[in-house]
Amino acid sequence: LYFIIKIKHISAIAMIKALHIYAMISLFLSPRIGAFSPIALRRRNNFLNDIARVQNTKRKHSSSENETVEDKIILYTLPSICMPPSEISSVIRSKILEPFYPKCFQDVFPRPKIVRDCLPSKNNSNNSKVILLDPDVVIASAVDEVSCDNEIIDNFPGISLDVATLLEKKHLASPGPLMKIEIEKKLLSLESLLTEVIPPEALPPPSGFEEIGHIIHVNLRKQHLPYKFDIGRIMLSKFGKKIRTVVNKVGEVGGPYRTYDFEIIASSSEEKDDYFVNVVE
């Protein structure tokens, strides 16, 4: 997913060790240098550990031919910013946090709520609210590499000093807990689901299709044909309640009635030839 950190050439353990060494160097050279303070590094290390655990869990629940989209749950681990409930509507209307909203929700419908109840802790009261943030934006890179006493900057270096100061002074905001958000995979868009099963060289995935009764008809391109059964399986799972058969056009349209040959690439029907439909216009 968008916020999951991808490590290509080094292991997650090596990355964490490197961050620990960097934290010790920062502690020795400068006890507090804004976004690179030991406190901020420890928080980011903890966040990376949580991300690694989520990655391992997702590998254990990887796709298989027997699973359907309805069987799967996606777990997001997102940072948050905490504030009194009375300040939430003002912050949302001002749109100062809009660039930091989770991008992983953009392909989900209906869109998950970004405002949640705050998990109780010694720093936050039970009636506080949190706004979910995108980890790739608020944690990945620093905007202001300056010395400051702003707790938001210490934890979220991707937020600018002006925005962090406004949130802290005017809206009484503070860094919130890491929030575990579960999303049903069937709520993702069809394009997102197909992108997971099609390799990069065959992208973009097929997007257009026709629906006739309980049948979906697609025109797959040449690069999609090796993955046609996976495509059919995903489409059948996505629209499973009203769709029983997925077919792909084979050859060209021709003949007096302009018909074409097709092949069945997915079917949930017990009938062998379940491609007769009644259309009412």
Image (spheres, grey):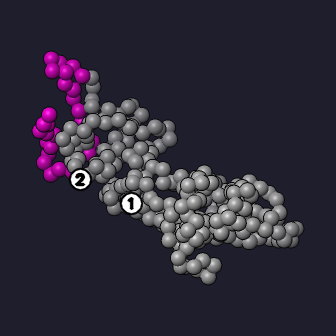
Q: Quadrant of residue 210?
A: top left
Q: Which of 192 and 33 lies nearest the eye of the viewer?
A: 33
User: Measuring 45% from the left and 49% from the top, which residue is drawn there?
Assistant: 107
Residue 122 rendering spot, x and y as whole percentages: 62, 82
Packing grade of label 1 (10 A; few <14, some 14-19, many >=20) is: some
Q: Which of 116 and 167 lies nearest the eye of the viewer?
A: 167
Is 272 one of the magenta-colored residues? yes
181 vs 243, left or right, is: right
* Picture disc at residue 72: none
Mark positioned earlier in the residue sequence (1 or 2): 1
31 vs 190, left or right, is: right
Residue 266 rendering spot, x and y as whole percentages: 26, 45
Q: Secondary structure at mark 2?
A: loop
Q: How many marks?
A: 2
Q: Which residue is mark 1?
A: 184
Magenta stretch secondary structure, dominant: loop
Residue extent of the magenta highlight: 253-281
185 vs 91, left or right, is: left
Is 53 one of the magenta-colored residues? no
Q: Which residue is mark 2?
A: 241
